Structures are given as C-alpha cells and as structure tokens.
C-alpha cells in the first residue's frame, strides 16, 4: 500500500554474510522509512499522486447474521448482550473494497531544508471509511541534520506500523509476515489509537547505535476541541532500529480522555463525539506498549514476532441525555447494576491484557511468497465482578500465499482458523464480539475462513 507519509530515508547497512543475498539498498531504505514505493506514481512539479485499491472476498464458517438483538449497539452496553435465537447460522461470504489516494507535496528550499504536505482519505465499499475523519492532512518541514516536524491530521505508529503494509500487500507485510487471515486481528485490536486530528510530530535524523541505525520520534495530539473539564491528551513515543538482518519497532502510547475503546485503528477525539457531554463525565485513560521485530534468516526466509501490553482505566456508564432513547457515553468494562465505594452506579473497572504475534515468510521466487501467521489475544486482569470478556482469549492462525503479477498488481489468498478460549463475551482486546473474524463469540467458539484478494498500487 503506497504511503508517502513519511519517515525520512535511513541507510541500512548491507548484509555481509555470503550466504545471504543483500536486499537492494533502496528497498531497505524504504523499509526503514515505512514507505512503499508506488509503481505508477503521477508526478506534477512538487506534487505527487499515489495510492492503492483493494478488493477481497472471504468465506467464513459459523457465522450468525444479525444475531445481536440490538443491532449496531457497542459491546460494552448491557442491552447489547442479548442474542436472538433462531437466526440463520452457518457459512457466509463477505467482501470489502478499499480505495485510498495520497496527494503529496515536497519541495527542497535550500540549505538542507525541505517543506512537505500530505492529504489522504480512504473509502470502504464506496463510502468514507470513518465519517468525519481524514487519514492524512498535514504539513511539515525537514532538515537533513535537525530532523522532521509535522503538524496536522495523521495516523499513529501504533496502528500504521502493524497495519502498514500488513493488511494490504500480497501475503501480508513485507516486514511482519503473517497474511490476510490474521492481519487485522493484530493491527486493529488492543488499547491503542490509530487516527489523530490535531497532532504535532517530531522525528530525529537517523543515529548510529548498536551496530545499526535508530530513529526516534514523539507525537502529541490534543484531540477534538470543545472539551474543557476532560481535556483529551495523547502521547506516542516511537523508536525504530535498523540493523543488518534485524528490524525492531518499539511504540508506547499513553492517552487520556479519548473515547474508551479496544480498537487499534480508533480515532482519538474526546470521551464521546459530543463535547456537550463534558460536565457529565469523569475522565478515563488507556495506553499500550508494543514491541515488534523482524529477522532476516536468509535471502528468502523472514521470521517476525510481536508483543503488546494493553491497559484501560475503565469508564463508568453514564446516560448523557434523558429519556428511554437518550444517549449514553462510551463506557468500558462496566459492572452493570453494581456501585463503587462512593455508591456511584455502573462503575467501570481497570483492565490489563497481553497480546502476541508471530510470523514466518518464505519467498519462493521473485513472484511467489508463502507465509504462516499466528495472533493470540490474551485474557485480561481486572477487578470487575461481572464477566465482560476478561476471561476469554482468541487464537487466530493463517497460511497464506501471494503472487506478484507486476509492480502494480498483486493477488493473494489465505486459509485461517479462529479459536476462542470459551463461548461468551469476546476478549476485552477487540472492539466487538464478531470483530476481525465475523464469528460472534457468544454463538460459536471457533470457525474457519478462506479469502482471496487483489491489490493495485498506483
């Protein structure tokens, strides 16, 4: 998936072992920068137009269509717990199309300075992916010695590094192995956030360290405007190590007063979409720490692994507008019907969990690649006396194959198996009971899927 966002190009040292064929220096530099070179970029002066289009079809077993009685209600609301009996249950097909262009601007202005800008939006099945949010709308300035400063709307490293180009390239990522069957289970879960709207990001120039090069970056976002009592605050620290045969990403996020979620792609705005709710709510926080590594075993074999630690403060359930159809806040891990030590009803409890990822990727030849992937979303530790999914786990495994037709078009397929630890509420680390798998954990504790797709880069 082409993405001109850009970390600056950092040199990777060539491989020295005779048994390993060196990866082209340009490709390694792009890997360090998390940038995928488009095959058909359109350049006009200092502007460039790149992007990707994707179509994917998946057939999944043990799918129950519209089994939740209150359709569309978020999982942490107690009235979303009920299941309708007698609904059709079995193998179902699903499909998705994605389209995302990137309009970039880059201009050298002399003495090592460069100015740049980026505008991008994603459409899913013909509609804006996240209504009211842009993926990229930022400007910045860079200097070859002093680093890079970016202002505006952008994606976080906590989501874009596991996702990019994990979900959108043949057989998964050029970096992390796996495949389409487990990609979003890893990138789109956990206690992180994925989209920012009013961010400031600074990244240093590459620094030689530990036999390789290291990039350091810090990002701060103030969320959406209008919040006075519960002001949103987001901080992300990022470091990337680029060695001869090893890439390592370390990402730490700490967020306060964002919408409480377990969705790694979630936008960071405020406690709810409505700043008028501010006086009625107490604050909440969440964060995660993520470590990912990729090791080049030989010229054709890559191993990858990741671990993520999640934490949530929990969020009390509060009705923000009156009446039986009134609005509620975005609550998290609530003991419905319970009270806290001060007698406040429906308290939200803190929780912590750990998730794991592993992958193996084998490049058969210049066209064909095969891979195996594993994601494990662990149970959570919490004092909540009610069962809200903290006891459950999810194991997702996949075998995938990708074929590069040319520099522009890749096709791929995967076989995946999903296993919940128990039937019931889904693990706290995913946003909905059927998220990422299409299998509602309250209806079935396992299922399989087969998927095929195509990706076009321009």
Image: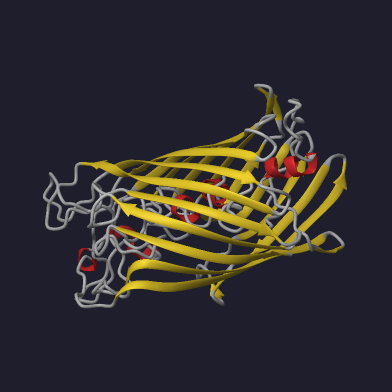
Residue furthest front as drawn: 364
Residue furthest top as drawn: 210
**Quarter assignment of residue 103:** bottom right
In the rendered image, which quarter contains the C terminus?
A: bottom right
Task: Please tell me which residue is depicted at 31% across the width and 65% down the height of the picture.
Answer: 74
Task: Please tell me which residue is depicted at 36% across the width and 66% down the height of the picture.
Answer: 61
Percent from the top left, x then y, of residue 84?
Answer: 21, 74
Q: Is residue 251 visible?
A: no
User: As rendered, which of 162 and 103 lies closer to the eye?
Assistant: 162
In the rendered image, which quarter contains the N terminus?
A: bottom right
Say how many tags the image has.
0
Q: Is residue 315 visible?
A: yes
Percent from the top left, x then y, of residue 405?
Answer: 72, 62
Percent from the top left, x then y, of residue 331?
Answer: 28, 57
Task: Please tell me which residue is depicted at 54% across the width and 39% down the height of the picture.
Answer: 304
Q: How is the image coloured?
A: secondary structure
Task: Please tell me which residue is depicted at 76% across the width and 26% down the height of the picture.
Answer: 18
- Above or below, 26 against 242 in this view is below
- Left or right of 424: which side holds 263? right
User: As rendered, which of 365 and 43 lies closer to the eye?
Assistant: 365
């Amino acid at each position: 998936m082409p993405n001109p966002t850009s970390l600056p190009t950092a040199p990777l040292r060539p491989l020295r072992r005779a048994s390993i064929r060196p990866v082209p220096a340009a490709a390694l530099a792009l890997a360090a920068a998390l940038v995928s070179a488009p095959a058909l970029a359109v350049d006009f002066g200092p502007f460039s137009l790149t992007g990707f289009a994707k179509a994917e079809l998946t057939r999944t077993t043990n799918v129950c269509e519209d089994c939740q009685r209150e359709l569309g209600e978020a999982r942490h609301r107690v009235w979303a717990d009920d299941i309708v009996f007698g609904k059709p249950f079995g193998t179902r097909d699903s499909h998705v199309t994605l389209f995302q262009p990137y309009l970039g601007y880059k201009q050298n202005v002399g003495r090592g300075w460069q100015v740049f800008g980026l505008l991008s939006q994603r459409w899913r099945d013909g509609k804006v992916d996240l209504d009211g949010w842009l993926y990229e709308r930022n400007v910045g300035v860079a200097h070859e010695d002093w680093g890079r400063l970016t202002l505006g709307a952008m994606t976080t490293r906590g989501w874009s590094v596991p996702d990019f180009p994990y979900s959108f390239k043949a057989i998964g990522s050029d970096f992390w192995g796996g495949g389409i069957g487990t990609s979003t289970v890893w990138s789109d879960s956990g206690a992180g956030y994925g989209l920012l709207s009013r961010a400031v990001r600074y990244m240093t120039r590459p620094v030689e360290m530990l036999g390789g090069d290291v990039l350091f970056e810090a990002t701060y976002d103030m969320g959406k405007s209008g919040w006075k009592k519960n002001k949103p605050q987001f901080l992300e620290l990022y470091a990337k190590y680029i060695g001869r045969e090893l890439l390592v990403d370390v990402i730490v996020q700490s967020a306060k007063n964002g919408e409480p979620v377990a969705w790694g792609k979630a936008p960071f705005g405020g406690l709810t979409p409505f700043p008028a709710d501010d006086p009625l709510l107490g604050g909440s926080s969440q964060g995660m720490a993520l470590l990912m590594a990729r090791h080049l075993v030989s010229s054709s074999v890559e191993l990858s692994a990741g671990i993520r630690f999640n934490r949530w403060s929990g969020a009390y359930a509060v009705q923000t507008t009156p009446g039986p159809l009134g609005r509620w806040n975005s609550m998290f891990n609530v003991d419905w019907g319970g009270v806290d030590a001060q007698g406040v009803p429906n308290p939200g409890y803190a929780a912590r969990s750990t998730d794991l990822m592993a992958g193996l990727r084998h490049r058969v030849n210049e066209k064909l690649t095969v891979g195996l992937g594993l994601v494990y979303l662990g149970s959570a530790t919490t004092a909540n006396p009610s069962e809200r999914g903290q006891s459950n786990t999810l194991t997702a495994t996949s075998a995938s194959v990708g074929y590069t037709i040319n520099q522009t078009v890749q096709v791929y397929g995967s076989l995946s198996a999903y296993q919940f630890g128990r039937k019931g509420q889904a693990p706290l680390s995913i946003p909905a009971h059927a998220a990422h798998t299409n299998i509602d954990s309250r209806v079935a504790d396992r299922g399989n899927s087969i998927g095929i797709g195509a990706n076009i880069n321009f």
